[in-house]
Image (spheres, rainbow, N blue to C red):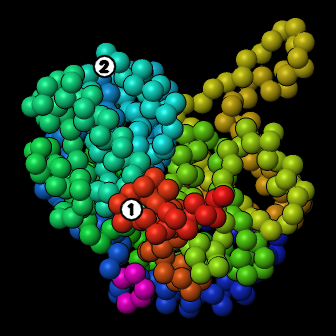
Amino acid sequence: MLKLDLSRTIGMVKEEELKLAGPFTELALKTTVEKSGAGAEFLGWVELPANYDKTEFTRISQAAQKIRDDSDALVVIGIGGSYLGAKAAIEMLGHTFHNEMGKARTGGVQIYYLGHNMSADYMNEFLQIIEGKELSVNVISKSGTTTEPAIAFRVMKKYMEDKYGKTEAARRIYATTDARRGALKGLAEQEEYESFVVPDDVGGRYSVLTAVGLLPIAAAGIDIVEIMAGAKDAMDHYLTAPYADNDCLKYAAARNILYRKGREIEILVNYEPKLAFFAEWWKQLYGESEGKDGKGIFPASVNFSTDLHSMGQYIQDGRRHLFETVLQVGAPHRDFEIPKDEADLDGLNFLAGKTMHEVNTNAFRGTVLAHNDGNVPNLVLGIDQLNARTFGEMVYFFELGCAVSGYTLGVNPFNQPGVEDYKKNMFALLGKPGYEELARELNDRLK
Ligand code: PA5
């Protein structure tokens, strides 16, 4: 199980304060479990690790097997919650150079992401890289109407039909969307794509443990049974453990205590490049869940030791409105010993025989103390090793922690009203029918 260490919070999260926060977080947990608070219609993720649709899960595994058998690469089309979880898992659990390694060595197909931006350069260069590969496509959109993936899918549908013909293209396209609504649902039915469901009661950013995340993750060759088992372990523990033994509730409490003392930015820190995209997933989860009604901790992230050489100065010495949550991995999959050099011209022989992990761990230890000296509280979350089981645990820990933290803050952690504003403006400026009046107003303001 994950282990939260609050001993590096430089006295800003006192034992007494944590105790006082306990009943509030327990109430927030009760509100979540009993579905009695705001956004209760989006709480399907809470018991998902136990209640997930086993028939759909089998279909996901079978589809992933077919993709691995008949394709070199899977194109994952989605944005926000419809791709971040899959990418976080594949980067954390797969080979660092997964796409370059090839199917024979990783046991999974190459994964390419599309539909998460509107860049012409990205599209053109993506079309170059997939040239000559056997392909499958997984288009993922809960609403089925999001512009970025819709444009990408229009392009890929034609590409696949030109390459394989209509019938074979349809056999290689998988749609993950709402059970009933949206343009993608209608399209998938008409074209007879194999379809998977984003449950009504699971919002985009909480959907990684549904087909949204699981199909691409399984196609990449990762064990999704273990992921669900890890999430179930976490669910069983964090939903029932008393506050004193419940690190998930304590995480929610500690970050709210720090927020009320003016620490308005939380930086998720890792010392392992495989976690860089886990941080992107986490940022969406916390940013969209808590950033509303003029409130919310701003979620940021850094990759150490890389970013100690870019962001380190600010964190050590800049404005004191931040705190860090450090993901500390206990052991690598395989350590690497630093070689001895007889001449020692670089003066590095004091490290000879030590391992990279030892050096990395001491970078972590030294940095925590330095940042503490710079008046930055650190929460440290210990993770034994990066594997499918711990990924499931981490997902559940942060999802539940987010719900509890959001309710403690006094916001609805399950809506995202602010995401709509840019979309309306963009549609109006692009001339979408029905947006004429807004278009006139915006064009006046842009003069
Ligand atoms: O968390 C959310 O709800 C959003 O970030 C969505 O995941 C994102 O906007 C994509 O939406 P959709 O899956 O409907 O295309």
Image coordinates of residue 129 in percent, x first then y, are 42, 21
Q: Is residue 152 magenta?
A: no
Spatial CA distance of label 2 from label 1 is 30 Å
40 sits to left or right of 379: left
31 is higher (above) or lower (below) than 425: below
The residue at the point 49 percent across, 86 percent down is 28
Badge 2 marks a residue whose secondary structure is: loop
Label 1 packing within 10 angstroms: few (<14), some (14-19), many (20+): many
Image coordinates of residue 93 in percent, x first then y, are 45, 40
Three-letter residue code for mark 1: Gly
Instruction: Magenta stretch: give its range.
Output: 36-40
Q: Can residue 408 be seen in this snapshot?
A: no
Image coordinates of residue 40 in percent, x first then y, are 36, 82
**Circle 1 is placed at which residue position?**
204
Label 2 packing within 10 angstroms: few (<14), some (14-19), many (20+): few
129 is higher (above) or lower (below) than 427: above
- The residue lying furthest to the top in this view is 343
214 sits to left or right of 286: left
